[in-house]
Amino acid sequence: MNARDLLPLILVLSVLAALPFLGLSGSVLNFLVTTLIIALAGLGWNVLGGFGGQYSFGHAAFFGTGAYATAILQMKLGWNAWGALGAGIGLGALVGLAIGYLSFRAGLRGSYFALVTLAFAEVFRILANAADFTGGAAGLLLPLRPGLATLQFADRKLFYLLVLAFVGVALLISRWLERSRFGAHLIAVRENEEAARALGVDALAVKLRAIALSAAITGAAGGLYVQSFLYLDAGVAYGTWISVEALLAPIVGGIGTAFGPLVGALALQGLGEITKHLAGGVPGVDLVVFGACLIAVIAFAPRGLLGLRRRPRKARAVPVGA
Amino acid sequence: MLSVVSLTKRFQGLVAVDHASLAVPAGSITGLIGPNGAGKTTLFGMISGFLTPSEGRVLFEGQDVTAEAPHLRARRGIARTFQIVQPFAGLTVAENIAVGAYLRHPKRADAVAKAREVGTRVGLGDQLDKPASDLTVAGRKRLEVARALATEPRLLLLDEVLAGLNPSEIRDILPVVRSIRDGGVTILMIEHIMQAVMTLCEEVFVLAQGRMIASGPPRQVCADLQVIEAYLGKGAAARMKAEEAVDA
């Protein structure tokens, strides 16, 4: 990667980093934090689904694992929050590897893979709802203890910047996928697995690495979520809602592009928030809007919002020496 | 360089390839011909690792690779093209070829440079930045060859790269195939176009109904009675002989 590849990334991150210092109200800042966490989960989904073409309907399995690990390690084992978050990311990746190994070894693709991931996430949800160490149906309440070691900040701006830093790393990883051998192999597997294998690509290994990376990023989103809200139960951690948010953001924003999930999350969450305000107390009205958006995007902009910019997509010249 | 020993593939009851053997000497262009449904592509599938043989062995440079996965054989230096072209539709021509080039060039700059060089060599020089889906049939065939070639193979398996091309396109691509061999790559090609087989191949193997029925220099094989019967039906050879006698 050279400076030109990184310029858009630096610009976007700088703008987002400046936002909280424009005197935004607490609720707007909270909205931005949630949106960035969802964008992060979407960036994770996009590694496997966007670049790798393996559509998961169960990224909640990774999000929830990251969240529970972050909470439980602190509460039950007295870990430092940073260590717990790191372990959550690692465990998320492990769960990803396990699910990937089982389903990719069996040769599951397309809707079969989607259904299996959905089932795994549901199993996790039911188990977490029943087990003791996850707090069962009552959930877990992380004690309020502001401080650097507990990753809780009295100033919401700091937490926002922390989440943004994670989003920045995930964007960097996505950018790297667009410019590296691993990314090329992943895209080749998405486009035509047989042809990729004939060219020396170990399709199984590529998919396993992708799901581990994807799960780690989404696991980080889970860990940050619990640090942000200090509360967790099975429905939040392993619920379908986050699986859906994680795949809607990249699909609406631009699937298989570095910035797609970020754009999609901002657009969808923004729209959802506006509808909630306009429609007053009608419960679930934002979900209706989500559904309508998805249909509109699939019908009119299959490449997502970013795809609208340059349509029909001109072939990008591959610069020599990039 | 490549030897196939008594390779057999059964699909349930159907024997697609029946104890077929062949040998490809290093530096040669060897042809594999046979009527439709003879099992040529199945044999290719077993040589490249996409199909597991029911019996027999595949030896590449003296090593038994019968049970090896396709990507490992590609790393060893066996590359193949597909009869039904398989471009990465969402990528440009250069990006397609680069996927192959990444096998020996982990750095992006090197892989892209190699891809452009190979692309130019097979005659795709002015289409490198087009989406692969915009290519004509002839262009896609060239892309298949370029992608395989970008893996820098020692043995190249070409599965009907000339099928579906018009005579002038065939004339254009023949020198490309020959230049690949002159560059040190051994070639085994499945081909139906006899004119191409005659001009390119030093040795030809004939597969019919899963069995290897003849082998030798192309001219000799074409005169073989069994081969003529395999293509034209039983009794055809005798009839042709009789007609020749009448003409004379």
Image (cartoon, helix red, strand yellow):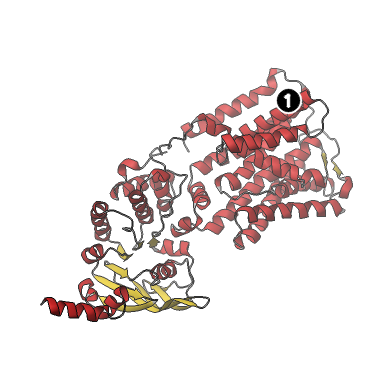
Instruction: Find residue A283 and report its horizontal and vertical position in percent.
Output: 82, 33
Near-viewer residue (B159 or A178): B159
Instruction: Find residue A51 and report its horizontal and vertical position in percent.
Output: 55, 45
Residue visible at 32% across and 79% down? B213
Left or right of B100 on screen, residue B123? left
Q: What amino acid is found at the position of numbered circle 1 in the picture?
A: Ile
Residue visible at 31% across and 43% down? B125
Do we see residue B189 in this rendering?
yes
Left or right of B124 on screen, residue B11? right
Q: Is residue A306 above or below residue B127?
A: above
- Label 1 crowd (10 A; few <14 / some 14-19 / many >=20): few
The subunit carrying tag 1 is A
Near-viewer residue (A6 or A267): A267
Q: Is residue B213 above or below residue A24?
A: below
The image quarter in which residue A143 lies: top right
Residue visible at 53% across and 43% down? A177
Q: Is residue A188 above or below residue B240?
A: above
The image quarter in which residue A38 lies: top right
